[in-house]
Structures are given as structure tokens and as C-alpha cells.
Amino acid sequence: MSAFSRFTALAQTLPSTVPFVGPEAIERNRGLAVKARIGANESGFGPAPSVLEAMRAAAETTWMYSDPENFELREALALAHGISRDNIAIGGGIDGLLGEIARLIIEPGTPVVTSLGGYPTFNYHVNGFGGRLVTVPYIGDKEDLSGLLDAVRRENAPLVYFANPDNPMGSWWDADSVVSFARALPETTLLILDEAYGETAPAGTIPAISALIGQPNVLRMRTFSKAYGLAGARVGYAIGTLGNAEAFDKIRNHFGMARVSVQAALAALKDQAYLADVIARIGASRERISGIARSNGLLPLASATNFVTVDCGRDGIRAKAIVDGLMEHGVFIRMPGIAPLNRCIRISVGPENDMALLEAALPEVLRAVGSRQ
């Protein structure tokens, strides 16, 4: 018997892959150094100095497991949002929480509704538990709320995923539309409302916590990875009713959070002045990227996130050539994976040094791409 044959029948059908190819792998495989890391929607502005100090202090206690109840962080988040700590579940980033939701709900063949070209890590978890993805195309580079609702009803789906603001397009819906969508869903359908980019969205985009806190079929996902600059710390949380939040305790890794990461999140919550400064810098960097794109004849899309999606005007072949060409200059960016979204490239915000490298490399890459096509 081979080792492989010991795996479940489902596991034997799954590819050995990851949803994203990391810049480290690109460096190894192509022998190129990343000089501007502006492709993974991290925050190159980094966490607050107060957060770094808290992490250094917490390192001395890293020999201990973290509190398996995550009491202190849940309490701090509850105070920040004006809710009970029992409405909050903590996990290893939104990605980790998505995997736990999939484990709680999905059985082989379970229909799960999402947008075609939306966040691939969610799809990865659905596939990992044998779910059947039902996808709805974007309309006008926005997720189609009516189409998602129709698919849920048609399939009698127990789970639907919707990100607001959206990745990979950076588009968004207003809060009233989001609330209307959530309330129109069948009671038997759980909405995963991914608000990873909520801090960078325009006013009126994110529903008030009170608007959905009592709805038992909604889980709102938040993270410290984006505006707070803690992508490598892996801290995310879910907001929902008592029953939904407590359900994670049935299957989660109770010692899965690192003490250093938890202390980083606590310090980040306290330093709202730094958060406000970073949000302003993110906005300025979005404008910088948009200006660079326009000056090179490309069309930047309006963005509510910490990245700008840029329409390259043709198809995925041209967009990939631009992505690959920029990497030759050490500028790491990404692109959507599904047509027609893949006519675009996606550029994360970053410090001025990164923007300068992008500004210098892009016209050279476009000239080279144009001469080959």
C-alpha cells in the first residue's frame, strides 16, 4: 500500500497546490529578487511602532501557549465594536476562519455560492471539504448581488461568500445594499461577509455592527492583516450571533494563536492614531498608482481597498506579460485569474520607494510587451 492510498478518496482527487504563488517562490523559481513587494495586498507601511514594541516584549513569553479562549483579545474587540465578547471568534487570519467555516458546514456535494473570479482561498477550502462551487459572474467589475441571491435560492445553498470591498477588483457596494442582500437570504443560508478591507473603504460602505449583529445567518469577517500591517502575524476574527461564534469552539485549534500575534493585535487596537495615519497614506498611494497607470495609457479602476486594479485594455495574455515583465525589474504584482477580470493587473499600495520602482519599470515593460504582441 502506498502512502498516498491511505488518504481519503477526496484527498486523493485534490491537487497539491496553494491558492497563490508567493513572491518567495517566484524569487526561487525565476532567480529574481523582489525589490518592490506590491502584489500581495500587505501593508508595506508596516505596523505601528507601539505594536512592534509590544511584540518585542511578548517575545519573552513565547515559551507559553496563548490563552485558548482568546479572552483578552475578544474583550478588546467587543469594547471596540460595542458588542459582547461572546459575539466574536478569533482565528489565524480570515483564511483560517474560512477553513473552519467550511469544516462546520460543507459535506461532499454541498452547494456553495460565490463569485466567479472572487477570493480563491475560499474556493480552496470549499474544494478541500468536497463542496460544489456554484459561481456567479461579476457585472461591471462588481460582485452581482442579485445573481448571488438567485443562485442561493436555485441551489438551496447553505453557504454564500461575498466580499465587500472586493478582492480582486477593489469594487464595493454601499451598506444599505449589503444589508438588503443579507436580509433577503433564506434563513438556512449562512452569509460569509468578508470585510477584510473595511478600514480602507469610503464612508457608507460598511454596515453598522448593529445592523446585522442579531441576524443568525451572517458572519462578518475582519482582519489585522491589511490596514493594521500584521499580515505575517495571522490574526483575524468573526463577528456573529452567540451560536455562530461559539460554533468555532467545536472544531478550532484552541492553541492555534501565537502569543506575540495576540499582543500585536491588542496594541494595534489601542493605537488608532497610527491607523488613521496609515489609512491616509493608503489613500495617497492609491492615487499615486492611478496616476502612474493613466500616464502609461492604462485605466485604473476605483478602489476601496489597499490596492488598485488596473485595466490593461485587452486580455489575460497581455496582463500576464505585464506582470511577468515587471517582475524582471523586481516589481512584484498580481492579476485576477478568471476572464474577463484577468484583463487587469492588481497593484498593492506601498511606500514611495516602491512606487518609484513601479513608475520607472512600467513604461519599459509596456514597450517590450507591445513589441512582442
Image (tube, helix red, strand yellow):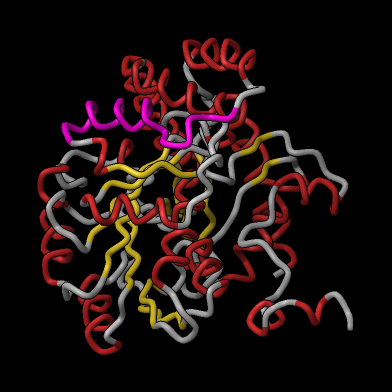
At x 78%, y 78%, the residue is: 6
Image side of residue 281 versus residue 81, left or right: right
The C terminus sits in image quarter: bottom right
At x 54%, y 10%, the residue is: 53
Q: Nearer the viewer, residue 119 or 262?
A: 262
Q: Is residue 297 visible?
A: no
The N terminus sits in image quarter: bottom right
**Residue 320, position as x, y percentages in the image:** 65, 63
At x 25%, y 79%, the residue is: 147
**Residue 233 colored in magenta in the image:** no
**Residue 235, position as x, y percentages in the image:** 48, 37
| Number of numbered tags placed on the structure image | 0
**Residue 59, position as x, y percentages in the image:** 63, 17
The furthest residue to the bottom: 154
**Residue 74 colored in magenta in the image:** yes
**Residue 244, position as x, y percentages in the image:** 28, 56
**Quadrant of residue 135 within the rendered picture:** bottom left
Q: Is residue 337 visible?
A: yes
Bounds of the magenta span?
65-83
At x 83%, y 44%, the residue is: 32
Up-down relation of residue 206 to residue 372 (above or below): above
Up-down relation of residue 94 to residue 66 (above or below): below
Up-down relation of residue 20 to residue 8 (above or below): above
